[in-house]
Image (cartoon, grey):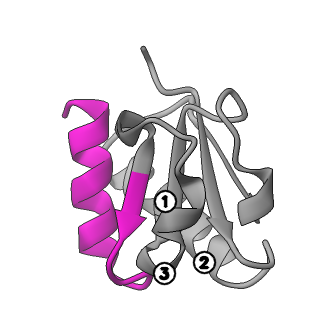
Amino acid sequence: MAIQKIMCACGSGLGSSLIVRMNTEEALKELGVEGIEVLHSTISDIAPGVADLFVVGGDLGDFIDGVDESQKIILTNLLDKEELKGKLKDHLGL
């Protein structure tokens, strides 16, 4: 399944999810990937079918149990752009 939409989420949907969204957009650009919509929201908006891939911090990984492992990126460090880029690369098969 091709990834068309990525949702970055945090507890409130405002702070860290916005930062991760911007980092995700930057990483996709660096990887030469176009055509993927990236949005940010609160963790409570995560549900199967809402997006193809979900990105959250390690502290929220347990809150997205209903999502298949293949659709999750759980970051150890929200600010580590290289960690995010590497995990995106793996999920995109690059």
Is residue 56 part of the magenta span, yes or no?
no
Which region of the structure is painted magenta? 73-94
Residue 19's disc number: 2
Residue type, label 1 = Thr
Q: Report the label total.
A: 3
User: Which residue position is annotated with label 1?
Assistant: 24
Q: x, y percentage for residue 20?
A: 55, 71
Identify residue type, mark 2: Ile
Query: For residue 59, which numbered disc appears in the image?
Result: 3
Q: Position of residue 8 (x, y in %)?
A: 61, 59
Q: Quadrant of residue 41?
A: bottom right
Identify whether 36 is placed above or below 89.
above
Q: Earlier in the sequence, mark 3 or mark 1?
A: 1
What separation in Å lies between label 3 and label 1 (alpha carbons)? Answer: 19 Å
Q: Position of 88 compared to 55: left or right?
A: left
> Which residue occupies 72% across, 34% down?
50
Lower sequence index among marks 3 and 2: 2
Q: Local crowd at mark 3 within 10 Å, few (<14), some, or many (≥20)?
A: few
